[in-house]
Amino acid sequence: MPITNRGLINKAGTIETGALTSGLLNPEQARKFIQQTFEATNLSPLVRHEMRTAKTGEIDKIGIASRILRKKTENTDDGYRAGVETPQIEYATTAIRLPWEITEETLRENIEGQNLEKIITDLMTTQLGVDLEDLYLNGDEDTEDTDDDYDFLKINDGWIKQISNDGHVYDASAETEMSLDLFYNTVALLPNKYNNGKLRWLMSPKRAQQWELFLMNKIIEAGGAVPDNVYTAPVKIPAIECPSLDDATILLTDPKNLIVVNTYDIKLRKTTEGQHAIMEDKRFYVAHLDYDPIIEETDATAIISGLA
């Protein structure tokens, strides 16, 4: 049978008088748990996932150089051999946790009964995936945003900050409306070797709808028609809607160029015992894990910022 969220939680053991028992998932369970969080969003299933044992380390960038063919000369060996390039990217995961609780009264009185525990666990796993994608994209350790009491975005630097610092930036703040030129000019910033059919636009659902509205208005004004694929694939590059992206930002890259690193050190713990559980008549849960969003080639990324 497939491993479910509830099954993972049930394997997590209990906490008795402060002593932890079990809770550490084995590699197969850890991989399955991370997969379940990735399935919660549009973008996360498309990016590259790396599981590691160490919290800090390096990941190989495996690539092959261009123009590696040589002229054949009979009965000779010039000593030439093509090789594989393996430069490396550093990663350093950041520890995070998600605690939640359910009152025993809620379980007793809810029509779902004990099944409510599974429903809530599924919801928490889904929300964990949504929150993680938010961090993958928008994380900024230097943000001055003080609206969040828990400094949510300060946990780690995300892909937007990394691309803004080291990728190709197209500033659209001076443009009063969207246009095809906006997309063509951004694609032109990337070296041709990365414009290989694997690129994707990443934009918010609202921005995608505004782009569609812009095209529809142009059709009405000109009395013509726009091919359907222009709505979802400007410059023949498909778009992926990401609710975690703000409306003023569009990213351009191959999703596999975006990497999420997790370690196998994932713990899911549950307790119905102990002073707090007994006095408050609750079940307590907590998920412990870590992550680091990195980019394989920042030269293969572009960002449109400052959109009206």
Image (cartoon, rainbow, N blue to C red):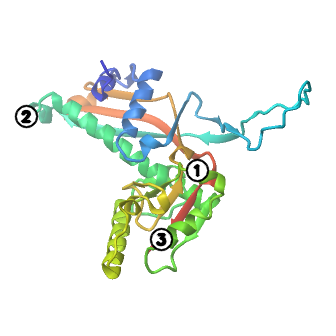
209 shown above or below 116: below
Q: Are marks 2 and 1 in contact (CB under 8 Å)?
A: no
Residue at the image position 36 percent from the left and 77 percent from the top: 218
- Type of amino acid at the residue the image marks with label 2: Ile
Residue linked to disc 2: 111
Q: Nearer the viewer, residue 280 or 193?
A: 193
SS of the residue under disc 1:
loop
Which image quadrant is residue 238 in? Answer: bottom left
Extreme residue toward the front, this view? 74
Between discs 3 and 1, the one toward the N terminus = 3
In front here: 112 or 163? 163
- Residue plotted at (31% across, 29% down): 5
> Which three-letter amino acid code belongs to the residue tagged 3?
Leu
- Mark 2 or 1: in front is 1
- Residue 52 appears at what percent x and percent y? 56, 30
Q: Nearer the viewer, residue 297 or 17?
A: 297
Q: Is residue 10 left or right of residue 201?
A: left
For mark 3, give the secondary structure: helix
Q: Residue tagged by mark 1?
A: 196
Residue 196 appears in the rendering: yes
Q: CA distance from mark 3 to mark 1?
A: 20 Å
Left or right of residue 300: residue 124: left
Q: Name the residue that disc number 3 marks.
A: 180
